Image: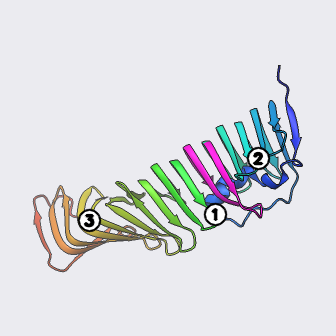
Amino acid sequence: MTRRRTVRAALLVSLLPALCVASWAAASGSAPLSLASPLQLTADQVTVDNTGATLTAAGHVRIDYGADRATADLLRLNRAARTAVLSGHVTATGPQGQATADAITLVLSQANEITRAVMSGNASVETTQYALSADSIDADRSGEHLVAAGHVTMFDAPDLVVTGDRLVYDGRSQHGLVTGHPTVANKAGRLQGSAIELFRAEDRAVIHGPVQADVYGAVATSEDAAVNFKTSVATLTGKVVIVRRQGTLWADRVTIDYKTRRLVAEGTTRAHFTDLGDAGTP
């Protein structure tokens, strides 16, 4: 019969800073973590080798570090590799948010700072401002670089949703690139392209074509598009075609103001109307 054991952070203190907040902290780009609070590890069974180089904790693993906590089925620590691997129903919670995954691998520097967090299998990060889910999330904290791959979905408050197969985000420039059938949507409409660039500081996106947009019951196509989320204005450029029940519009450039529900066509423009019964909407 195994018994629950509690291990204080003494033997492997250099390898165990705030494990429980590392995953989402790495994704959010917060300041480097340091060992400033007592850490407590609890599990059904804890095994340490004779040299103290490795530790394995199994069964109801729980790590408490100040106000933060991580739980998992298994924890493996390796002093030489400076890695901590949590696996099996991993959940990390703290004041800033929560992270979950099938497994989380943490890499530590010689200064006991978590430099990288790799989340795999149903990975998700949730804070009050945003949520990110993917098959895997690899966050390099030292370079402020994040890569999410596989069924990527990002929600940014209040209502922006971005999906795709792959997201690469640079925290220093606050620039993201989404590829693999990417879409960007909010309550006003939805746009899809071959690639979407996100400029978080400017609150805007650039959609590289071919672009398809769904707006107020119309289907629009163009070579490129841009969206300003602050002003709720989308601009479609290059061989713009908008098809509605009332007819078809061709233009070089079309600006859509979601607040006023107005559409402005510019450049070489022509239209073919088949039904004018609903002329009051764009």
Badge 3 marks a residue whose secondary structure is loop
Q: Quadrant of the N terminus?
A: top right
The reply to whether the magenta stretch includes residue 42 is: no
* Earlier-in-chain disc, 1 versus 2: 2
Residue 141 badge: 1
Q: Is residue 130 visible?
A: no
Q: Which circle's residue, 3 or 2, is located before the other in the chain?
A: 2
| Relative depth, front residue between 193 and 108 | 108
Please state which amino acid type lies under the numbered disc 2: Arg
Residue beneath the point at 37% across and 67% down: 258
Q: Which residue is mark 2?
A: 69
Q: Which residue is mark 3?
A: 282
Residue at the image point whose x is 81% and y is 38% from the top: 49
Q: Quadrant of residue 281?
A: bottom left
Instruction: Specify start and end residues of the magenta stretch as a single range.
Output: 103-131
Majority secondary structure in the magenta region = strand
Indicate which disc, 1 or 3, sits on the residue closer to the N terminus.
Answer: 1
Name the residue at 48% across, 62% down: 168
Kindly indicate the quadrant of the structure image that contains residue 35. Answer: bottom right
CA distance for labels 1 and 3: 46 Å
Q: Which is in the foreground here, disc 3 or disc 2?
A: 2
Q: Residues within 10 Å of mark 3 (few under 14, many from 20)?
A: some
